[in-house]
Image: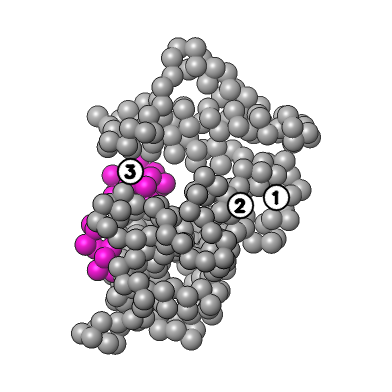
Amino acid sequence: MPSKDNLNAPTLSVIIPTKDRGPLLNDHLCQLIKTTGNFYVEIIIVNDSEKPLDNFPNNHNLIICQNPRSGVASARNFGASLASSDLLLFLDDDMVLMAEHIDAVIKFHKKNRNAFLNLNWIYPPSLESQLSKIPFGRFLKSHGFNSLKGWNKDNKEWRDNEIFQTFGITSQNLSVPRKTFHDLGGYNENFPYAGFEDQELSQRINSAGHKIYIDPTQMTYHDESDRMELKLWLKRKYRGGITRKVAVHFGFTDYTLNAGIAKKGLIRVIHLLEWVMTTPPFKSLCTRLPDILYFPLINALLASSIYRGYFSREAQKYIQ
């Protein structure tokens, strides 16, 4: 939906930040190029790694740029600054969209010019099947980590069959008019790791009076098949704890964590359990535990990782 003074611009600018996920990104990019073939869409890949991207398909609407070690918020902002279209679609490198999803985004924003839109997502069938065969996968499914609806299990606004208004965004697939995004100032780049920039931007969106919608009828795939390793998952949760501490420093006091000497001691003990559950040969033995025992252990490791990140020296470094 180009403006009158921008009639030759693409209908949509898709902005994809990425870091060290070459093979997965390549597969999804080829699919996206096919998906957008009937639309005038530009695709902007922002590489946040020092490793260059290569072996990508040639396409005149594809822009690849370097933004090394600047973080996902910076990568999205940089991509938005390069966009030619009046409509932006921020897309994670592990999201898979079809032509009907692009069409739904464009049609939605013709009627809702200053709104933000998230499309629904689930894990792809192949990944769902894989998860069902391993205890960690079953843990993720039992907690709803395999779907947007699961992540929104406490959202009383959720509807299954119609677009509904909500109060928070997720940038996994997020569309917004370019002017609206820039008028809000883009993403906050002060968080050390990904995650909390969505909550912070959501707060500014709501304060400005803009509306956020989820379309549950448009089901996309979120392919995290390369992130199903427990050790790497816990590392991301540790980083999330660091970012949480920074968020509290910025005024999001609802996310404050407290821990006395006894709790911190318990966290250290649980951290030893993490070593056991992620190191061969103990790792293999732990996966033989029944789910009724395995799940509480993962919950303990999850809490420990968040707390350790929150109270780490690294977190303290970011708020000094």
Amino acid at pointer 3: Phe
> Of the numbered discs in the image, which one, if any, rests on residue 191?
3
| 198 part of magenta stretch | yes
Q: Name the residue carrying label 2.
A: 146
What residue is at 73 percent from the left and 29 percent from the top?
293
Q: Is residue 105 above or below residue 120?
A: below
| Earlier residue among tags 3 and 1 | 1
Closer to the camera in the image, 97 or 204: 204
- Residue range corresponding to the magenta coloring: 178-201
What residue is at 72 percent from the left and 53 percent from the top?
130
Q: Is residue 211 above or below residue 151?
A: below
Q: Is residue 220 left or right of residue 91?
A: right
Q: Is residue 13 above or below residue 184?
A: below
Quick one: SS at disc 2? loop
Q: Is residue 177 left or right of residue 215?
A: left
Residue 146: x and y, percent? 61, 52
Disc 2 + disc 1, Cβ < 8 Å: yes
Q: Residues within 10 Å of mark 2 (few under 14, many from 20)?
A: many
